[in-house]
Image (cartoon, helix red, strand yellow):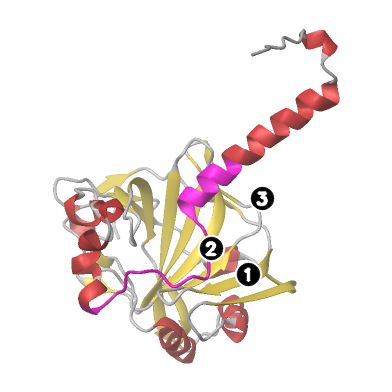
Amino acid sequence: MTLYRFDQGSVPAALIGGVAMLVCAANTQAWQARVSDMTASVPEWSYSGERGPSHWAEISASYSGCGSGRLQSPVPIETAAAQFRPCTPLRFRYRSSSLHLVNDGTALRLGYDRGSYLVIDGLSYELVELRFHVPGEHAIDGRIADGEIELIHGNNRGDIAILSVPLEAGNRVNQTLRRILDKAPLAAGKTAYARNIGVNAVFLLPARRSYFRYDGSMTRPPCQEGVHRYVMETPLEIAASDLARLAQITSANARPLQPLGARRVERLCASSDD
């Protein structure tokens, strides 16, 4: 075997830069694949029946954490029991994204263009996907919201941060959500892409930005743990008709509540008198 050794000065700068870009791209693809694959294939698990949440751990060895994990999500949140913390605001650096939708038979999913970030405690997490659930997944003071949006973020350090926005059926039309629903594929395994239609996730956030924080997991197989979970305290009001449209797309797709155990839930950016 012949080994070749190059002095740094003899290697063209363009080649060095090209190799660096390839390594960076590979790292980006690695963490994005871990957080969001955005494929339209219908998964082998379900939200009901013999392949429902109580059986996820039996379907595949890679799903074992769904049954044996101790930091699983979603969880019940009690405001009175949450540890009050001084405000550490969630900073949203979101840009508009082209409309890239997937109906994988378990959720309506919106893939997000590169370049939008959630910043907290000085760390940035890139927004890669939104997932829509009906009903909601988390319970706050014993009440599960009518729906919930998961905004899924990650970075090349392997960190995952998920912001959950509860949805409340009412009379107010959210134009961003309606734009998504108007293009949403109704059949499982189908996709929709509209490059000329833009959506900005900042318009899917409630005006009041107080939130809860705890250590949790993804709420679908393989239920990986080590996820930074943030749950908005105030729900986003949407039209009742739009909630019904969401429910029609994938039926009920919320994972049952998981034991909180000894985990601590923190409450941030809320008045101590609330």
Residue pointed to by mark 2: 38
Asked whether residue 41 is drawn in magenta, I would say: yes
| Magenta stretch, residue numbers | 28-49
Whether residue 98 is situated above or below residue 248 in the rendered picture: above
Q: Which residue is mark 3?
A: 115
Task: Tell me the kind of residue under disc 3.
Answer: Gly
Q: CA distance from mark 3 to mark 1?
A: 15 Å
Residue type indicated by callout 2: Met
Disc 1 designates what residue? 100
Secondary structure under badge 2?
Answer: loop
Q: Looking at the picture, which amino acid does disc 1 mark?
A: His
Question: Quadrant location of residue 23?
Answer: top right
Q: Position of residue 80 (x, y in %)?
A: 19, 57
Q: Nearer the viewer, residue 19 or 215?
A: 19
Give the CA separation, mark 1 to mark 2. 9 Å
Query: In the rendered view, does 166 fall on the left or right side of 10?
Result: left
From what the image shows, is residue 250 above or below residue 90?
Answer: below
Q: Residue at x 25, y 72 (%)?
A: 51
Which-is-in-front pick, marks 3 and 2? 2
Disc 1 to disc 2: CB gap under 8 Å: yes
Confirm whether residue 216 shows in the render. yes
Q: Residue 118: give x, y in percent of width and height.
A: 54, 49
> Dot 1: what SS?
strand
